[in-house]
Amino acid sequence: MSEASQNLLLEMRNIDKSFYGLKVLDGVSLDLYAGEVLALLGENGAGKSTLIKILNGDYQRDAGSILINGKLVQISQPRDAEALGIRMIYQEQHYAPELSVTENLLMGHLPSRGLLVDWNAAHQKAREQLKLLKLNIDPTTPMMNLTVVERQIVEVVKTISGNARIIVMDEPTAAFPPHEVALLFESIRALVKQGISIIYISHRLDEIFQIANRATVLRDGKLVGTRRIADIKHSDLVQMMVGHEVTTGTSEASIARKNVDAPPVLQVSGLSKGSLFSDVNLQLAPGEIVGIFGLLGAGHDAIINTIFGETRPDTGTIAVSGKPVSISSPRDARRAGIGLVPADRKVQGLVLDMNVRENITLSNWRELARGGFFQRSTERTHAKRWIDRLGIRMAGGMATNLRFLSGGNQQKVVLARWLEAKVKVLLLNEPTWGVDVGARGDIYTQLEELASQGLAILLVSSDLDEVLSVSHRILTVYKGKLTGEFTRAAASRETLLNAAAGGTS
Ligand SMILES: Nc1ncnc2c1ncn2[C@@H]1O[C@H](COP(=O)(O)OP(=O)(O)OP(=O)(O)O)[C@@H](O)[C@H]1O
Ligand SMILES: [Mg+2]
């Protein structure tokens, strides 16, 4: 598709936006053609979400204009955007888990016969709507039985009813395992065929190359440029985002495992929990980074949550530094020297009303309060160290409340808290969800650095490249059982996927 043959649908012109006197968008412009997928790219805090919140009427711009089909439009609240055919797909999904797909889709306008709901007609209507987006599921299924991806697509189906022309997706796949992304892409292609345009935000660049026609790149609130995807290389796109060349990947030297023969700092034996997982045995040596890879629902999340005491196992023992520990709550786990960076940072990880400094030092207050009074300047030094090392960016310095940080920067703060906490064992669940390409490398460097000082790290990730680049050793999980163990050198995408899909290698 060439732009020449397409109609310019949306123009955002010279948009400015400041928060508390700090400019986060500075003269940003964006064009969207009918029936295209436009990627919106940039590092954490570049201004992507702010720009689309302005488009949706969630935030008010300070200057600039918005045109649809060449006509100036006024968008001062979400309702205005909706009337213009603009739809947002939110990551936090709102649905009734017990109710069927049909009920969720047609809620409020179920077809009726007399006083009764005409269920046959309702399911039929739902089936047709789902089919439009290539989703082959039984609409009588309760929402809670769907996968995350399927639920997200149902969400999209819901929003396209009516006059939808522009659909904005802000990191829709952040919580998807990579192999399920294809399903969403089929739906996106079906939308585009219907003439709908998509603005697509993601930190996974491989997705951009699969789905987008063009990419608009922001850096520090300014427009860097727009390129056709067919004309640009991966590395050039990264360079546009970060402003300099980036080398990714871990050097072979740093993957040599240290302390191989040291006694394990974490030893898990015969751990089982209902139908979630059974007979899990694993151990971590000091300084070792072990990755656990599994497909969605394989039970790897449940394993680390149980080690952290969020749920009690049915059987099994956990020992830290050779001593058996009884862990029945996260508090017990922390006392035993175990920390967890959770996947759902909004719910488990952060205190949104506390500032960046406090969030980083929260787990270390004992040390900071040494001598009977709280050492504010030490606290500041500690926080500053992580802000620098992980490149945490915020408009107002370390006294900024966490809720005002961009998504990726919030994730870095959760990580900083646990890196600061001086634990012996760190459990990480999807540590780089929503983190930009440049910062991802910084995080891996810090993990290696801490491991070289003796920290043992157990990493759960659905990102194969991540597992392959930071782990010394990799375990695969299938249906709640450990199915394989690979050294980093022996592991490849194929062997891991195969073992995680239940295949015997
Ligand atoms: N409501 C707000 N109050 C104060 N500052 C804000 C607010 N919303 C966003 N910011 C600031 O604006 C800047 C841009 O944030 P934005 O959320 O747009 O980034 P982003 O590009 O979406 O990043 P990410 O990839 O991490 O999601 C950040 O410095 C952020 O801290
Ligand atoms: Mg964002």
Image: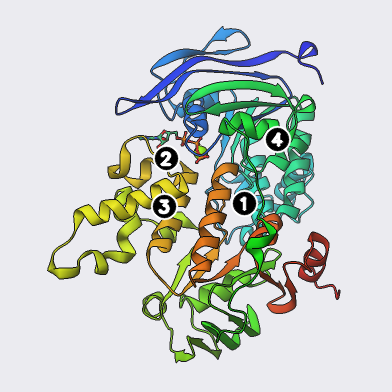
> Could you tell whether 360 is left or right of 88 in the image?
left
The span from disc 2 to disc 3 (Cα, nearest Å) is: 10 Å
Looking at the picture, which amino acid does disc 4 mark? Ser
Q: Are marks 1 and 3 in contact (CB under 8 Å)?
A: no
Depth check, mark 1 against mark 3: the one in front is 3
Give the mark nearest the N terminus, 4 or 2.
4
Distance between the alpha carbons at the discs numbered 4 and 2: 23 Å
Depth check, front residue: 188 or 41: 41
Q: Amino acid at mark 2?
A: Arg
Q: Are marks 4 and 2 in contact (CB under 8 Å)?
A: no
Find the residue positioned furthest to the front. 253
Residue under numbered circle 4: 235
Q: Which residue is mark 3?
A: 413
Q: Is residue 24 above or below residue 411?
A: above
Residue situated in front as seen by the camera: 59 or 433: 433
Dot 4: few (<14), some (14–19), or many (≥20) neighbours within 10 Å? few
Q: Which mark is residue 393?
A: 2
Place of residue 505 in the rendered image (x, y in percent of width and height, measured from the top left)? 86, 74
Q: Are marks 4 and 3 in contact (CB under 8 Å)?
A: no
How far from the left and from the top, in percent, is residue 125?
73, 43
